[in-house]
Image (tube, helix red, strand yellow):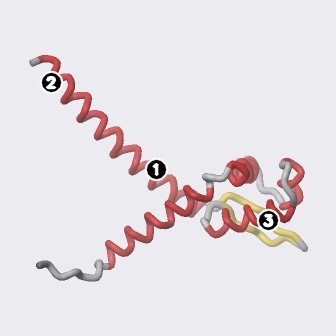
Amino acid sequence: MKRWQYPGRMARHRALAVVKDSVQLAALGDPTRRRIFELVGARPRTVVEITRELTVSQSAVSQHLKVLRESRLVRAEPKGASNIYHIDPAGLGQMRAWLDRFWSSTLAAYKVAVEKKSVEDQQ
């Protein structure tokens, strides 16, 4: 029987990356957070500016922004008594890299399936 071994450094790093990607995808799973993300993506905004565009309270917007900040999709820049929210390029880049890897492997699998089907049809 093989003994369980604690995963190596690279395996832990990959596992943490998957968890981060999952958190980002979960954060964007909420329609209100997606809309907030889109608004902030169009241009940096304050909570008040975001609230004016939505049908939820300022408190609710703040809670959604907290989730987006924790998932590294947006960042807050203090300015006076308020914060200006921006897209977090590092977090967005991480999610983009994951989606690119997913898309590449999916396309490769699709190509193999189509070629296999083509060969079977010719026989």
User: Relative to 49, does residue 121 appear above or below in the rendering?
Assistant: above
For marks 2 and 1, give the CA distance.
30 Å
As displayed, is residue 51 above or below residue 65? Answer: above
Left or right of 30? Residue 9 is: left
Dot 1 amino acid type: Leu
Seen as rendered, the residue at the extreme front is: 1
x and y, in percent, of residue 86 in the image: 72, 60
Q: Among all residues in the image, which is located at the extreme top? A: 122
Q: Position of residue 52 (x, y in %)?
A: 89, 51
Q: Residue at x 50, y 61 (%)?
A: 22
Residue 7: mark in rendering? none
Circle 2 is placed at which residue position? 119
- The percent position of residue 12, horizontal first and vertical second, equals 36, 75
- Where does the image place residue 50, in percent across and percent down from the top left? 83, 54
Q: Residue at x 76, y 62 (%)?
A: 85
Disc 1 element: helix
Which residue lies under the disc numbered 3?
A: 62
- Location of the C terminus (image quadrant): top left
In which quadrant will I find the N terminus? bottom left
Q: Earlier in the sequence, mark 3 or mark 1?
A: 3
Q: Is residue 109 above or below residue 58?
A: above
Q: Which mark is residue 99?
A: 1
Please rate how many residues cluster around mark 2, counting C-alpha atoms within 10 Å: few if below 14, some from 14 to 19, many from 20.
Answer: few
What is the three-letter code of the residue carrying label 3?
A: Ser
* Residue occupying the point 84% across, 65% down: 59
Classify 10 Å Cα crowding around label 3: few (below 14), some (14-19), many (20 and above): some
Q: Which element carries disc 3, helix, strand or loop? A: helix
In this rendered view, identify the residue nearer to me: 69 or 81: 69
Q: Amino acid at mark 2?
A: Val
Spatial CA distance of label 2 from label 3 is 56 Å
